[in-house]
Amino acid sequence: MGFDQQAKAADVTGIPCVRTVVDLRSAIARWRAAGETIGLVPTMGALHDGHLALVAASLEKMDRTVVTILVNPLQFGPEEDLSAYPRNEAADGEKLTAAAADLLYAPAIEEMYPPGFATEVRVAGLTEMLCGASRPVHFAGVATVVAKLFLQAQPDAAFFGEKDYQQWLVVRRLARDLDMAVRVERVATMREGDGLALSSRNAYLTPEERAIAPKLFEMLGQMAAAIRKGRAIDDAIAWGKDELRRAGFGKIDYLEVRDQESLVPIEAGEEGARIFAAVHLGKTRLIDNLAVAD
Ligand code: PAF
């Protein structure tokens, strides 16, 4: 089935939609033949303004923008929210149409992982700490699906959000290590007016939890300011954890100050330092991060 027919067959209106690698490649080949550059925005759908900022960054820099939607089972642990993860392809299609993205690639799980699929892409080091420590299968799942998407689409650039900073580092490492000719770009975190980082998982928050959630970013800002003024890092971390507990957050997976290139712990100073946090609020796990330097 050709690309245009496939668009009609899909249950997405407006933006052309392909569901197979063959159709994705034929759409991209036409653009390449015309000398156009390709931007890729990988997502798991449930699109919000944070995703649309990635689309906008690609539209600005690239000739063509391809958005992918796949709730990737490989990156969810057995106790995680794979089945509850929000899915609304029709609404996503409308948002992408309004944003003027060029193509939606929304493969079925069986297209991505056909019977017999047996390969895992694993990035050592960067994935063994922070989110990797509390979500042991997560980054191998991300690296595997992103490597496949890069090989399927062969984009010139791909766009990832700064909220998932560790993910961006892992994908950049993967592309460098595997000699993939793709620029892995980072786009600033989009926030609600009260500072809460946009995330598809914010939909899980009850109204009471939603009122508490922005305190995470507020606390990161206060920690960064205190470190800039010379407060010892261990001391700032202990203070931040107390603040989170006082605000009503539950389990703190981590609150750490790390070097923003290598993710190794930073003992003192602000040069290259970034604060990383993952905390539970009711059923929701929130992550955020902030550079210490202004
Ligand atoms: O950030 C996400 O939404 C996902 O981890 C990604 C990069 C689309 C891979 O499934």
Image (cartoon, rainbow, N blue to C red):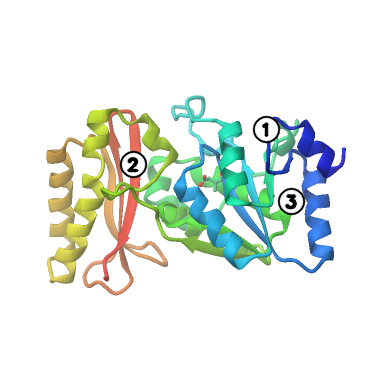
- Mark 1 highlights which residue? 109
Kind of element beneath mark 3: helix
- Identify which residue is drawn at 35% across, 51% down: 191
Which residue is pictured at 57% across the width and 38% down the height? 92
The residue type indicated by label 2 comes to Leu
Q: Residue 256: percent from the left, percent from the top?
A: 27, 55
Q: Is residue 294 left or right of residue 87?
A: left
Q: Secondary structure at mark 2?
A: strand
Residue 121 image position (x, y, % from top left): 62, 49
Q: Are marks 1 and 3 in contact (CB under 8 Å)?
A: no
Disc sitting over residue 286 in the figure: 2
Q: Nearer the viewer, residue 176 or 286?
A: 286
* Res 189 quadrant in image: bottom left
Mark with earlier residue (2, 3):
3
Question: Mark 2: few, some, or many residues within 10 Å (few <14, many ≥20)?
Answer: many
Frontmost residue, 65 versus 269? 65
Q: Amino acid at mark 3?
A: Gln
Q: How many angstroms separate mark 2 from mark 1 (CA)? A: 26 Å
The tag earlier along the polypeptide, 1 or 3, is 1
Tag 2 and tag 3, C-beta contact below 8 Å:
no
